[in-house]
Image (cartoon, grey):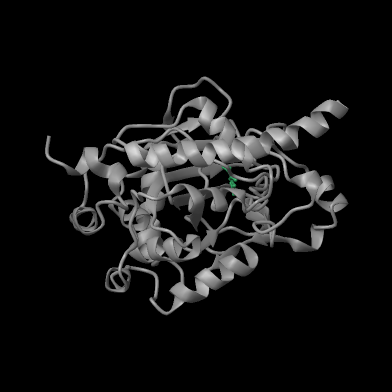
Amino acid sequence: MAEKRFIEPFLRRLRYGKTIRDMRRFDEDYRPGQSASGEKFYNLRSAMDLRPTAGREISHKAIRHTRGAIPTQEQARRSTFVAIEEVQACVEGLRRDGVYVFKERIPEDMVERMRESALKVAAEPRGVETPPAPYPRNAPAVGRYDINEDNTMASPDMQDYCSDPALALIAARYLEQPVIQDQTALWWTTPHGGGDESLNAWLFHQDRDRASFVKFLCYLTDVSPGHGPHTVVRGTHRSVPAILSTDGRKDDDLIRTAGLWDKVVELTGTAGTFMAVDTVGLHKGTPPVDGDRCVLQVEFSTSLFGAPVDYPVFSPSPLARDRYQHMPKILQRWYRSLTPA
Ligand SMILES: O=C(O)CCC(=O)C(=O)O
């Protein structure tokens, strides 16, 4: 035990150096469809135990040949829902708190269409072997239903949200490097997940799928304190006490013991509320008690090094085609759907 206490920090520092070299090679040799090996991904996660900023440092040290890009101000002005004036405010909010809630909401008609799509496509119940089927809103059986990227992108409005140039610009300015849209997610949480707190991400944790990344979450349903709000511990994207620094789930008592309870913020809001979150900081969903909640999320990162990468297949809208044409590096994961066979 004592041995582990002394050896682990040493091993993490070794993995930190190794990850810089592995990530550099990955980006230099990158071919579409490629993912880092399980061992390299493990080393990245372990190196990120050192401090919340370790991944960002690794990314800055590793990347010489970027695979990403930075949208221009002109491209960002073409956002359908982010005011250009808010770009800098969001970057500053992220730097300070690790979270920023946008002043405006996504237009109601767009949110309604996205919610309808999230009810129509196949969803995968977490923790059971049942085959994917549309989310059974009147009789949910588990606490979380996930919708894969192909089905998420079936909605032209979700294609719009997930390729938004202003969100990409915020990500690039915040991370201070060119970015790639590296992941999207869409899920329902329900009041039927008692006992599955860890499985449903209802315990605090830090994301480590990539070295340097930021997420944009949008509520597609009204989220009151009883509808399972996304919850963050402000400031933990910059530093955390040693007892909270390692990978894995942490319960509320541990956050209290660490003296951070006054930094906990539950993010409520009506449907269409959207926010930027640096989920390298401690965060969780909360178990809904009064009704379900639907969230759409897009992530931008500085590299595809880390977790396995998905390349969604979908029918692109005219807007998605236009975005891909103008931001091919940022939207490179869409190549299967956008380049002629
Ligand atoms: O449901 C939420 O608000 C948080 C989800 C989350 O943190 C996760 O899926 O890792």
When asked about the image quadrant of residue 106, the answer is bottom left
Q: Residue furthest left?
A: 340
Q: Tell me if residue 181 can be seen.
A: yes
When asked about the image quadrant of residue 153, the answer is top left
Q: Considering the image in quadrants, where does the N terminus appear?
A: top right
Q: Residue furthest bottom?
A: 85
49 vs 167: above or below: above
Query: Which residue occupies 40% across, 45% down?
Result: 182
Q: Tell me if residue 200 can be seen.
A: no
Asked if residue 119 lies left or right of residue 251, the reply is: left
244 vs 71: above or below: above
Asked if residue 91 lies left or right of residue 26, the reply is: right
Percent from the top left, x then y, of residue 202? 67, 42
Q: Residue furthest top?
A: 129
Q: Quadrant of ligand 1?
A: top right
When asked about the image quadrant of residue 333, the answer is top left
Q: How many marks?
A: 0
Query: Which residue occupies 34% across, 62% down?
Result: 70
Query: Which residue occupies 60% across, 42% down?
Result: 190
Q: Considering the image in quadrants, where does the C terminus appear?
A: top left
Query: Which residue occupies 66% across, 59% down?
Result: 238
User: In the depicted view, which residue is nearer to us: 88 or 12?
Assistant: 12
Asked if residue 76 lies left or right of residue 170, the reply is: left
298 vs 135: above or below: below
User: In the depicted view, which residue is nearer to us: 217 or 61?
Assistant: 61
Percent from the top left, x then y, of residue 219? 50, 56
Percent from the top left, x then y, of residue 302? 43, 51
User: In the depicted view, which residue is nearer to us: 135 or 53?
Assistant: 53
